[in-house]
Amino acid sequence: MTDLPRTPRTTPRRKPDRVSHDAQAIAAVLDEALVAHVGFVEDGLPMVVPANAWRVGEFLHFHLAPRGRLAQVMASGAQLCVTVTLVDGLVLARSAMHHSMNYRSVMLFGVAEAVEAPEEKARVLTALVDHVVPGRSALVRSPDDRELAVTAVFRLRIAEGTMKARSGPPMDRADDLDRPVAAGVVPLTLARGELV
Amino acid sequence: MTDLPRTPRTTPRRKPDRVSHDAQAIAAVLDEALVAHVGFVEDGLPMVVPANAWRVGEFLHFHLAPRGRLAQVMASGAQLCVTVTLVDGLVLARSAMHHSMNYRSVMLFGVAEAVEAPEEKARVLTALVDHVVPGRSALVRSPDDRELAVTAVFRLRIAEGTMKARSGPPMDRADDLDRPVAAGVVPLTLARGELV
């Protein structure tokens, strides 16, 4: 999860993590994730706030308290950087140095737009329930007019998204390979327990 | 995961998520997490980059490629906002509106400082290996001088951290309670599979 070099390198180094603009791979990350980290600038300072986020079509959606800080920021037309990260595995090498993580991270830039029409709000909020538990929206009470009125919904276009990822086994140095320690990848998944 | 209201409210609403400065609770979040989202401002625009992060004592640590973007940002003394979020559960209500998530999120602000001394670098990188898999640092090869030289380590003081969290069951409206649908909390944990 190191970042991209900005300057050309002459010395050998680890292969940089893979960058992609593949729309399907980006959609898969957004569809698996529950939380996005929303970055904005406030009084010249960075702010990073977690928020539920879910994809419907070509947009990533957010639901917010209308008078809350993040809704005010989005309504103001502030530039956003929204990052969604999934941790896929622990990469356990034979040297401390070559430990790493397998992950996929999507970064979106842009300005959010408010979803104002009640029927569109209802549609995407229904999609949120089904994003969390497929099929659940048919079982629960749909939002009424008052609930829709007190829920701000914003969306951000996904088109400009960038994905960065690492996958695969550790890359040990040849002279470490004989070391008597188990190495490889420990897969990580967000496991759901029983409803309490 | 809605944000704090900035303006006083006169209408009733859901209780805002709990904010805390409890040092032990903040340390627990940092110790459970694998990834932080690092926010900074670049050319006036927000950037949010995921990075491995781990706590040693009163500092959250980062290891970076020395010539990478994030290392350059940290070395420049830029103001950072670092947010670490754990998703603890899906809160399934009887109405779409009252669905929520249980989570804990820590936000740190400040300027990172470089960890330069090789012995201190080695100490905290060893702690990273044990953060990922307790006890593993004793089994793997420790970083050599060259590896330490090509790894930038930065740290950010935790003291000013803020935690925001939601926990507990859904808060359904009284007239939804008879609805014939299962409701409650689905616990979420980051599960580790078998080493591949």
Image: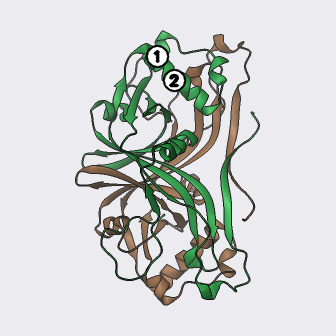
Chain colours: A brown, B green
Q: Which residue is mark 1?
A: B148
Q: Residue at x 73, y 65 (%)?
A: A195
Which one is nearer the viewer's eye here, B64 or A5?
B64
Where does the image place residue A142, in percent across and percent down from the top left?
59, 84
Q: Position of residue A193 (x, y in %)?
A: 73, 57
**Along the viewing direction, whichever of A21 and A174 lies nearer the viewer:** A174
Q: Amino acid at mark 1?
A: Leu
Instruction: Please tell me how crowded label 1 is: few (under 14), some (14-19), or many (20+) other residues with Cα within 10 Å.
Output: some
Quarter placement of the C terminus of chain A: bottom right
The circle on residue A130 is none
Residue B19 position by quadrant: bottom left
Q: Secondary structure at mark 2?
A: helix
- Outermost residue, left direction? A43
User: In percent of the image, x 49 and y 83: which residue is there?
Assistant: A147
Mark nearer the N terminus (2 vs 1): 2
Q: Would residue B96 appear left or right of B70 to someone viewing this image?
A: right
Regarding mark 1 in the picture, which secondary structure is present there? helix
For the residue pair B60 and A35, the one nearer the viewer reads as B60
Query: Which residue appears at 66% of the width and 65% of the height?
Result: B185
Residue A31: % across, % down: 59, 60
Q: For residue A154, which quarter of the picture?
A: bottom left
Total marks in image = 2
Residue B125 shows which numbered tag?
A: 2
Tell me the distance, in whole angstroms, between the alpha carbons under discs 2 and 1: 9 Å
Q: Nearer the observer, disc 2 or disc 1?
A: 2
**Subunit under mark 1:** B
